[in-house]
Structure formats: C-alpha cells, structure tokens
Amino acid sequence: MSVTDSPEVLERFHGELSLVEIVAAQIARSVGRSIEFDDLVGAGREGLLDAARRFEPARGVPFRAYANFRVRGAILDGVRQLSLLPRRAYERISALEAAASVSEGEAEHTFAPGSAVAPSAADDALAEHLAAIAMAAAVGIATETHGEATDSDDSPEEALGRAQLIQMVRSAIAELSNDEGELVRRHYLEGERLEDIGRDLGMSKSWASRLHTRAVGRLAKRLRHVA
Amino acid sequence: MAAGKLRAVAGAAETETKSVSSALFARFERGEIGVDEYLDARASEAVAPYEGKLPAERIAWLKGMLREQLETDPVLSERVRQATGRAPQAR
C-alpha cells in the first residue's frame, strides 16, 4: 500500500481481504501442487490492491466480482513464476487463466443495470457461457507446452486427439471476423497476451476482453457441433 | 468440410442441443432434479465436445474445475442465481 492511496481504495482493499484466501484456496486445490499457500495469498493481495486502485464503479460490476478476476489473475501469474512445474500443472494454470479471461469479458454485460433476465433466459446464458469457458480451457490445456513432461503424459493417441482439437479450432477461427479471428489465433495458438494483441489492433483492454469473450462463444458453438 | 456445410451442420445441431438443454432446465423447474444435479449436468454437457480429444484424466479435471467455477466465478454464479434462485455457497 502507498501513503497516496485514498480512503476509498483502502476501504475496498480491507473490505475484501477474505476473498484472497478463498481464491488462493481454490487455485491451490485446482493446480494440485504443494505450492506455498502464503505465496499465493501474497500474490493475491497485490492483485486485490491493484483492483482497489483501478476499480471503476461506473462500469456497473460489483467490486467483489471485479476483484475476483484481478486476484485470480495475480495468483495465477505468481504460480507461473515458480520454479519449473510439471506439464500438467501448467495445463491447469492455462485452463484457469482461460476461464477467468472468458468470464471477465462477460462481467459488464452480466451485471449491467437492468440485465436481470427470466430464469429460462439465464439458463440459456449460463449454458452458453459455460460452453465458452470449457472451450477456452480445453484449448488452453491442448496448447500448453511449458513444464516437464512425465511418463504419464500423452500417449500417441492422446497427442493425436490434441492435434485434432487444435486443427478444429484453426478451422473454426477461419469463420470469425478478422479482428475476432486474429485475437483468438494469436492468444490461443501463438501464446500472446490479450492486452498486447488488443493494443496492436487499436483496441482498449476492456474492448479486447469483450471481443475475446464473444469470439470464444462463437467458436464454442461451432466446436460443439462438429466435435 | 466446406464452410457452408459446416454452418449448416452447426445450425441443425444447435437446434437439437437447445432442445436437450431446455429439457434439462424444465426438469429442474419441475423439481425432478435438484440444483446440484442440474449444475453437474451443465458441466458434463460443456466438456462433452472435448471427450476423445483430451485424455480422460484431463476431461475429468476440466469437468470438476467447471463445476467449481459455477459456484465461485462471479459471472457464472450470478447466472446460476438468476436461473435457480439460489446464490452459490462459495461465492
């Protein structure tokens, strides 16, 4: 924290400190490694402070929801910087990063004033959003190349399955608009950061995030039906 | 597969998927299944396209991860609340 942080920033930070431990525990469970929990909490608190400073109430997303994504991102970044992990751990980190990234791009729409919908419409939105997250996470797993391979990693059949999935994604990307296709291709298949691609394409970070979520939703629909 | 044919297949299959999807929610609304069963089914449905493309162990992990996200991801948990009237416990 800095002496220049406003009382509002400090109030947001202290008011949601419990969120850090909740998210850190989820990630520790998901990654399944004996990672030092205190390290995760430390990274998460930095993410929370960053969220408290950057929060824009006018966007309509509750602070706890906004902070959830920032804390999650900071912890996952921190885990990536640990000493070399097995391939499987990196796959899980990629999948969790992809899931958070897809959801973050949908947050403003979900929490916008007047966005309350009938239960059946919410069910449709839930199914579509979950399918988009699953697609992004599956591709994150399939394309992850970091980490030490172990004996239990892919058999030739499993390697073929991954290659088929990546080829399906490549084919489906060809049906997206130019910007959507470039965003998805460079992020998932070439490993570039969304904000860097967005900057290249002249987009704000938030617009790149929304466009990414929309593109992934379209890809998921196509893959669901040709898989 | 040509792009036009791909779109046609996707369109027809989407109609079928919507109807299966609606049937699941209708069962939940009629009280035939509870919230947990409904969310389990949603997670299974989401990973189904990747079965056979990723190893079974990764699919199982992915499904478990999605199931947890339904209770912890702010956007998903808000949709769960809107659909079921229940705010997930781990929110």
Image (cartoon, rainbow, N blue to C red):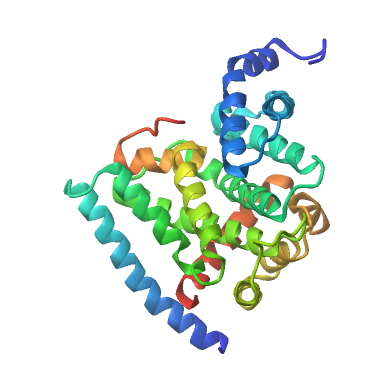
In the picture shown, does residue A100 fall above or below A19?
below
Extreme-front residue of the structure: A151
Residue occupying the point 69% across, 13% down? A10
Q: Give the residue displayed 35% in from the left and 40% down from the top.
A: B82
Between residues B18 and B67, which one lies in front from this camera angle? B67
Q: Nearer the viewer, residue B35 or B12?
A: B35
Tell me where residue B29 appears, x and y as whole percent. Answer: 21, 48
Task: Tally the marks.
Answer: 0
Q: Quadrant of residue B46?
A: bottom left
Q: Position of residue B81 (x, y in %)?
A: 36, 38
Specify whether A39 is left or right of A109: right
Which quadrant holds residue A142? bottom right
Up the image or down, A141 lies above or below A39; here it is below
| Residue A38 coordinates in the image, percent (x, y) | 70, 24
Query: Viewed as shown, does residue A125 lie left or right of A158?
Result: left
Q: Looking at the image, which residue is at 49% across and 43% down? A: B69
* Residue A35, position as x, y percentages in the image: 69, 35
Left or right, A138 with reference to B82: right
Image quadrant containing the N terminus of chain A: top right
Q: Tell which of B21 and A142 is nearer to you.
A: A142
- Residue located 81% across and 41% down the image: A81
**Whether residue A76 can be seen here:** yes
Establish if B53 lies above or below A201. below
Answer left or right for A121 relative to A85.
left
**Whether residue A112 is visible:** no
